[in-house]
Amino acid sequence: MTVHSASSSSLPRQRRWRAALLPFGAGVALAALYLYTASAATDGTLRVTVVEQGQSRPIPVRVRITDAAGVPISKRPLGALAMPGEALGVPREALAIMWGHDDSAQGYATQPDGAFYVDGTFEVPLPPGTYQIAVSKGYEFVRQQHRVTLDAGRQVRERYELRRWIDMPSRGWYSSDDHIHLRRSPRENPLVQRWLAAEDIHVGNLLQMADFHTSYFWQYAFGPDGRYQEGGRLISSGQEDPRTPEIGHTISLGHAKVVRVRPVDAYYGYDRTFDRVHELGGVTGYAHQAMTFHGYRGMTLDVLQRKLDFVELMQFCAPAGPLITTHYYHFLDLGFPLTALAGSDFPWCGRTKAFGAAEDEGPRIGDARFYTYVEGPLTFDGWIGGLKAGHTFATTGPMLDLRVDEARPGTTLERRTGDTLKVVVEARGHRTDVPLRDLELVVHGEVIRAVTARDAGQSTERLALSYDLPIGGHGIWIAARARGGPTQAAHTTPVYVRANGTGFANPATARRYLDLSEAYLREIEAELAG
Amino acid sequence: MTRRIADTRAILAQLGATLPAGPGRSAASRRGTSPGHQAQ
């Protein structure tokens, strides 16, 4: 056996090398210190406070600062709300792609587009120059753009007042994102709450995601133990599971325990999950407009067997989005009620040029959202009750109010041939942020009345129509939809009208949709049966 | 899955037998049988 050891002659040689390197290392350190202090001396400091107009308390908002070249700043401001890397629950390599910013040591504060969330105040040192500061807070506040010039060694203090263009909670409507992926322990609750508040989401559904093999984005608890309420905002656990490429991705919300079907060979039996979720007080639906991952196949089984409550009708994932009604109208026309929800699928998807956006925003909580009508103050029970009643609309900007004989979306009315329904619908927008284009009244999938912002008495901020709709020999479903600027649309859950004790299916499309359903069953057989 | 597909086919058959057939609401609307509307 040969033993290698440092010879007596090599030790002095190492010391000589270290001695020679010491001045070099010290020089590097001094140079770095000089550069740091020189930079600190020449930077200006931007200090910003954001409040709601007429109030004094700072509020959570989303901020994006770009330099004169339009590039987001790379320095993370003091006050930016950083999410621990663990909370994002995806591999480091994926984070690097999605985030692309080297801020992992202190957590992830910088959003994919360079924006960050703050709890009302922040401070950041920046090289002298002119900057654009974009401040936003979801869809009910007017977005702001500010231009600030910083001089070396000087501090600039800014105070911005965000103004609401609409107050939906005062009307009983609360915003939700049905599809957020963030791994959550109780420690993250206040942070997640502030991210939600910065996007003005009132109910954030954090989904534990799974496949055949494992789970991702773990939630520390389901049911009441997994809920968190602070400042009029709620966090609730849900699951995106089961999810397969053959019959789609599903979402369950509000149930008391996570449901995981085992063994693996039973995984395609989505109905087992849905039955259990319902027993546990939750609701079930298909994600991604039932468009991607062949969700329409699974829907054919689960809608017809009455296992489903909702469809994620709006989202910036499927290429034809954000509003895709193809599969929604299929099953509504066959006479099955389905509530319209929407969600972001954060940290995936997002508003991009491919959807008509001016810029690639990337993933963003609440970019597609739904509103639920809640009786009284916002509580989880009130919210899930409103959702189960179908009192919702999905939106990427416009606000909708549909009433049929005063009834809200999701209501089933019993009427007789010859009766007349009073349909009143209103869309609300904002001249610059959500400039309304048109409002459509949809019956059995077809537009029976429409107004545009150019029509007399209409505007980009308010579109309204009323219509006396006579009942014929069969039932109908009635919905409203609106369009605003590029990427902006909204769609209500229908009001269902049964006629003479029968359902609300569409006679004109029944044969076609029955045949289409059979075609989807054959697709499932070709993929899975046997 | 085979059972679920069979169950769903049974539902489709039942729907095929019971759903009303004929022109839809929009066809009636185009025929002008929806008077009384007003756009504000």
Image (cartoon, rainbow, N blue to C red):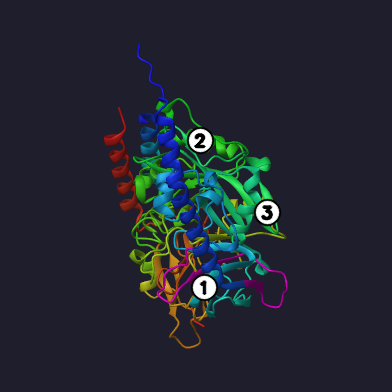
Mark 3 falls on what kind of element? helix
Label 3–label 1 contact, CB within 8 A: no
Residue picked out by circle 1: A134
Give the camera-side residue of A362 and A377: A362
Type of amino acid at the residue the image marks with label 2: Thr
The magenta span reads A48-74
Q: Name the residue under label 3.
A: A382
Which is nearer the N-term, disc 3 or disc 1?
A: 1
Q: Tag 1: Cα neighbours inside 10 Å, few (<14), some, or many (≥20)?
A: some
Amino acid, disc 1: Ala
Looking at the image, which residue is at 52% across and 47% down?
A: A85
Mark 3 crowd level (few <14, some 14–19, many ≥20, 10 Å Cα)? some
Of all residues, the one furthest to the left in this rendering is A526
Which quadrant does the N terminus of chain A fall into? Answer: top left
Q: Please name which of the two marks, 3 or 1, marks the residue nearer to the observer.
A: 1
The x and y percentages for residue A468 are 52, 74
Q: Residue A488 occupies which quadrant of the picture?
A: bottom left
Q: Do pointers 2 and 1 mark residues of a single chain? A: yes
Q: Is residue A186 above or below residue A62?
A: above
Does the segment drawn in magenta span residue A123?
A: no
Ranked by sequence position, the earlier of labels 2 and 3 is 2
Residue A190 spot, x, y in % from top left: 66, 52
Pick the residue in front: A10 or A151. A10
Q: Is mark 1 on a helix, strand or loop?
A: strand
* Side (left or right) of B4 relative to A276: left
The answer to whether residue A158 is above or below residue A195 is below
Q: Chain for mark 2?
A: A
Q: Can residue A517 be seen in this view?
A: yes
Residue A473 screen position, x and y as percent:
45, 61
Query: Residue at left 26%, top 35%?
Result: A526
Question: Which image quarter is the C terminus of chain A in?
Answer: top left
| Dot label at residue A273 | 2
